[in-house]
């Protein structure tokens, strides 16, 4: 992953995009709409990325889907929620542009490119003041990627799969001339570009970098794409790009173990709770599923048990991942809490006592030592359900700093002439730590900065290639 110059390029494309996840595919759609020829370079045989491993939910304010459900929202309220979660530590300009563009981006993807979004109802994600999560029908990131892939192909964007970007070529002024790609058989080629969009996510799959920047997750399950090795970060470091918030990431405190299947956090938001091997709660499950990953990993064996009931089981069945967990046998059902405890080899008396404590809290008796409010949800009732889970690292949130046009910035705050970044390659809006992640922040910047990057790249490439 070196940066070089002085290479002859037998082939040149106006806009080259590295990565065919949500950011790269959205960038391609925007660049094609602006009239540019586009080549996406994707290391996998089929576009996937971390997006395909997620629930595919994107927050947006002021959409027609919200209006149809009577939800009043606007970008300023959305931006305030993002900044409140990150404790005012993200770049307010990028937060503002992401919040302002999210609704229009989803409307554009829906109306022009056929992505079938609707509003997620039934529960409110922590930190969001109103319902604003949007998803495709199966609530699946794989489904979202498939729709974006089909749309990008239909738009005329070329997608070169099984091709890994290996070397970035830049001149002394920072202008990107092109990239070298390598295929699994060792063959490769040099491709020139008028503008380059880095949409190759972060460094979550790079254990050395994870240990260096987020040591608390060094030994955690990595639930992102293994190809997220930090190439964009390495290229940026070599070029002298500004980089920030490398300690930020999205974790998740509810991955079925050992099945490796994401279990929706809606179970916790709507009344469920988590216990450790002693059958006791250990945190405020409503603080956020990202920071809950750290709390779970601090428990004996790095394991927790999500406890809930039939009402919540029926709610979760709306998510494809949860249905997969049921099919895999990760979800257990029992007519009583004692029998559920026994099925997990937990002390029945301890789990029973924890259940009674949550019921008392739901009835307004006492206060939770972890600060959670139970009075707004019904107490759990038999039959009961449980899933054995662990905490996991999903994707990193720090990266190359960009301006509101998605141009990568140098350390002196000037921008590179034709280098752009979006999604996990760019600094996100979660601030510097895990607890700043607001549900959906990853896909929010993937699609909004992706669209902006594609538009900027198309406007940049003409002067660059002349």
Image (cartoon, rainbow, N blue to C red):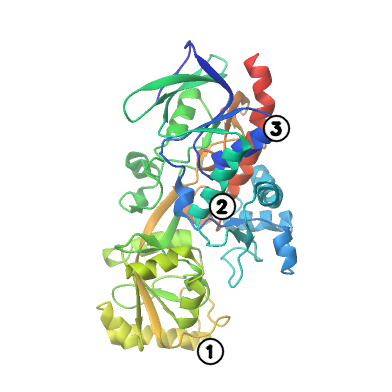
| Local SS, label 1 | loop
Q: Which residue is mark 1?
A: 363
Q: Nearer the viewer, residue 137 or 334?
A: 137
Label 2 sits on a secondary structure element that is: helix
Q: Which residue is mark 3?
A: 34
On-image quarter of the N terminus = top left
Question: Front-most of 392 and 30?
Answer: 30
Instruction: Mark 1 and mark 3 in contact? Answer it, CB < 8 Å.
Output: no
Q: Residue furthest left?
A: 345
Rounded to the nearest angstrom, the CA distance separating label 2 from label 1 is 34 Å
Looking at the image, is mark 2 or mark 1 earlier in the sequence?
Answer: 1
- Residue marked by disc 2: 441
**Dots 3 and 2: beta carbons under 8 Å?**
no
- Please tell me how crowded label 3 is: few (under 14), some (14-19), or many (20+) other residues with Cα within 10 Å: some
| Image: 436 above or below 419 | below
List the single residue furthest toward the front. 154
């Amino acid at each position: 992953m070196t940066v070089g110059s002085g290479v002859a390029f037998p082939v040149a494309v106006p806009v080259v995009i590295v990565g065919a996840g949500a950011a790269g595919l959205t960038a391609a759609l925007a660049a094609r709409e602006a009239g540019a020829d586009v080549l996406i370079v994707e290391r996998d045989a089929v576009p996937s990325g971390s997006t395909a491993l997620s629930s595919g939910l994107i927050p947006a304010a002021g959409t027609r889907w919200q209006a149809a459900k009577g939800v009043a929202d606007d970008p300023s309220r959305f931006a305030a929620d993002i900044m409140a979660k990150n404790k005012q530590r993200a770049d307010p300009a990028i937060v503002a542009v992401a919040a302002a563009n999210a609704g229009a981006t989803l409307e554009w993807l829906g109306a022009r490119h056929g992505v079938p979004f609707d509003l997620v109802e039934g529960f409110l994600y922590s930190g969001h003041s109103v319902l604003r999560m949007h998803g495709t029908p199966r609530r699946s990131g794989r489904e979202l990627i498939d729709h974006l892939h089909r749309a990008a192909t239909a738009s005329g964007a070329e997608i070169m799969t099984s091709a890994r970007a290996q070397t970035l070529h830049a001149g002394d002024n920072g202008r990107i001339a092109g990239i070298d790609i390598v295929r699994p058989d060792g063959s490769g080629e040099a491709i020139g570009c008028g503008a380059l969009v880095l949409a190759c996510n972060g460094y979550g799959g790079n254990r050395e970098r994870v240990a260096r920047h987020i040591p608390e997750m060094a030994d955690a399950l990595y639930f992102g794409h293994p190809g997220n090795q930090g190439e964009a970060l390495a290229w940026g470091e070599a070029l002298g790009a500004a980089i920030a918030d490398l300690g930020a990431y999205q974790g998740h405190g509810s991955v079925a173990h050992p099945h490796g299947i994401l279990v929706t956090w809606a179970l916790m938001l709507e009344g469920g709770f988590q216990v450790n091997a002693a059958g006791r709660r250990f945190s405020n499950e409503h603080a956020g599923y990202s920071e809950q990953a750290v709390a779970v990993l601090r428990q004996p064996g790095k394991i927790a048990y999500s406890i809930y009931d039939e009402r919540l089981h029926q709610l979760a069945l709306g998510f494809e991942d949860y249905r997969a967990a049921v099919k895999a046998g990760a979800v257990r059902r029992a007519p009583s809490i004692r029998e559920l405890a026994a099925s997990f080899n937990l002390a029945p008396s301890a789990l029973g006592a924890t259940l009674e404590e949550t019921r008392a809290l739901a009835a307004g008796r006492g206060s939770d030592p972890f600060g959670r409010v139970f009075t707004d949800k019904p107490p759990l009732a038999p039959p009961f359900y449980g899933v054995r889970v662990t905490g996991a690292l999903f994707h990193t949130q720090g990266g190359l700093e960009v301006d509101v046009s998605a141009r990568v910035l140098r350390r002196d705050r000037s921008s590179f002439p034709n280098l752009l970044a979006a999604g996990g390659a760019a600094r996100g809006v979660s601030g510097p730590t895990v607890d700043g992640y607001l549900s959906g922040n990853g896909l929010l910047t993937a699609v909004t900065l992706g669209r902006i990057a594609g538009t900027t790249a198309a406007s940049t490439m003409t002067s660059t290639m002349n």
